[in-house]
Amino acid sequence: SNGAQLSENHFPFQRLFIIFRKLNTMSSVSSLRPVAYTCPVKESKNCPTFSSCSVDPLLYKNIEVGSLWWIRYNDTLRIGKVLEISTFIQENAHQSQQPFIYYVHYLNFDKRLDEWVQFSRFDLSKGQLSDNESTSSTSSSKTSKKRKNALFGCEISSKNQKKTANGFSVFEKDHEEVTKIKNVQEIEFGKYMINTWYYSPFPSDYGNQRKLYFCEHCLKYTKKSKTLDAHSDICEKISFPPGKLIYNEENLVVHEIKGSEEKLYCQNLCLLSKLFLDHKSMYYDVEPFTFYVLYEKSVHGFQLVGYFSKDLNSPQDYNLACILVLPPFQRRGYGKLLISLSYEITKREGKVGTPERPLSDLGITGYRSYWQHAIFSYMKGCDGKADIKDMSNKTGIKETDICSTLHKLDLTTEFKGHGLVGIDLKMIDKYFEKLAEKSIRLANPKYLMLAAAKPKPQLKKRNSFRR
C-alpha cells in the first residue's frame, strides 16, 4: 500500500506488516493464528541469512495451543501452557527468526503472570510435557487439617459446597474462555505507567489497543496521549472527586459515590479495576452499587488510590462486593484500611457482614490478616472469656469468618462434643509485640462521618382477647 518494492527474498510476514501496520494488532492477535510454519525462502536456500539461521522453522510445528513446555522465566524454568499463538509482526522479523509469539499461562501461578513469549524462551531440550508429568512436577505434599467449624454452629456442608461448585462451573468456564487472553497490556495513569494483570471488557475500539491512557480525575480513557493532554487541560479545573465525603483523616479522604448518580465515573472505575481483578463480573450495571473511593489529597489535588464497592440489595449480609488498591499504592496498608472501613460502616448500620466470594489471592490474605487482628484485639480485653456471638457483634465480622479464622490459628478445641475457644495469651502478646515494630493502617471510627443507624422500634404485640 505504500509503494514499497518487495523482492522474493523478503520474509513473507513483512507483507503482513505493511498491510496491518496501522492496526496495531499486537493485542488483537487472534485474527492471525497459523498452526504451523515452514519458511519457503529458507527451503529454497535463497535466504540471505541462511548460513547464520540457528532456528529450524519446522520446530514451530511442535508448539501447539494446549501443549505444555518448560519456559524460561527470569532465571528459573516454569511449566507453561500455550493458550494462543500469533504472528510476530515487526519490521526486522526476518532477522529475529522468531515469526511467532505465544501466550502462556504458568501452572500453579496466578493469571496475572500470563504473558506473550518468543520462541527462544522455550527449553526444547526437555521436550513437551504430558498432563501427568506436569502434575507430578508441580504437586506438593501439603496436609490439610480437619475443619471444626461445626462445633460452633458454623458448619459448611460438603454437599452444599459441591452443589455450589457445580452451579458456578458453567459460569466459570465461560468466564475463563472469554478472559484468558489479556487485551490491554499497559496503562498510563497520571505519572504512573502500570502493567496490567487481566482482561477487561473495554469497547472494541479500545480493547484492541496495547496501551490506554487514563485521566486520573474523571477516569476517562483514550487511545492517544495527545487526546488525554487536551482533555486534562479542561478536567483539572473540576478535579474535585464526585460523591459525598464520608471519611477525612489527615491526607486521606473517602467519598461515597452512588452508581445511580455517577454512572459514567463508576463504569470507568470498574473497567479500570478489571485490569487488576480476575473474578469481577460487574462492569456496566453499576446502579445497584455504592462505591467507597479512597484518595490521597495534596496541594496538587486528589490521587485515586483504591476503592471498595457494596451491593445495596444484598440478601446475604455482604458488606463488600469488590475491593482494589491500584498496584503503585499496594504494600502501604491501604487494603486493611479499606477492609476495616467496610466493617466500621457495617457496625454503624447495626449489622454484621462478610465479603462477597470468591476472593482473590490478595483479598484472602488481606482479610485473614484483618480478621486475626480484630479477634486478638477482642481477646486482649475480654478477661479470659471469649463468646463467638459477642465477638461478632462487637467486631462486625460474621460468625462463620470468626470460626474459620480461629481454626486456622489453632485456637479451637473440642470438649464433650462442644467447641471451645482457647485464649493463648502468649500468642496474643507476641502478636502485639510484633505489631509495635510495624504500624498497621486501620480506619479510625472518629473520622467516619456517618451517623449510627437508629434502632428499629419494637412493635407491641396485639392482645388477641376481644371483649
Image (cartoon, rainbow, N blue to C red):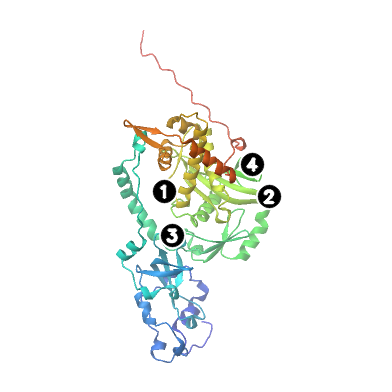
- Disc 4 marks a residue whose amino acid type is Glu
Between the C-alphas of marks 1 and 4, the distance is 31 Å
* Label 4 packing within 10 angstroms: few (<14), some (14-19), many (20+): few
Q: Where is residue 254 in the image (x, y as percent from the top left)?
A: 59, 44
In the image: residue 62, left or right of residue 396: left
Q: Give the number of the disc on residue 111.
A: 3
Classify 10 Å Cα crowding around label 1: few (below 14), some (14-19), many (20 and above). Answer: few
Query: Distance between the Cα atoms at labels 2 and 1?
Result: 35 Å
Q: Do the residues labelled 3 and 4 touch (CB within 8 Å)?
A: no
In the image, residue 362 sits, relative to residue 50, either above or below, namely above
Where residue 358 is drawn, which disc sits there?
1
Secondary structure at numbered mark 3 = helix
Cα separation, mark 2 vs mark 3, equals 35 Å
Res 152 quadrant in image: top left
Using the rendered view, name the quadrant where residue 235 is placed: bottom right
Residue topped by disc 2 = 298
Dot 1: element: loop
Dot 4: element:
strand
Look at 32% across and 48% down and name the residue there. 167
Q: In this view, does 331 lie above or below 31?
A: above
Tags 1 and 4 in contact by the CB under 8 Å rule? no
Nearest the viewer among 129 and 86 is 129
Check disc 4 and report the residue beneath it: 249
For badge 1, the amino acid type reads: Pro
Q: How far apart are marks 3 and 1 (CA)?
A: 15 Å
In which quadrant is the C terminus drawn? top left
Q: Can residue 28 be seen in this view?
A: no
Q: Residues within 10 Å of mark 3 (few under 14, many from 20)?
A: some
Q: Which of marks 2 and 3 is nearer the N terminus?
A: 3
Disc ID at residue 267: none
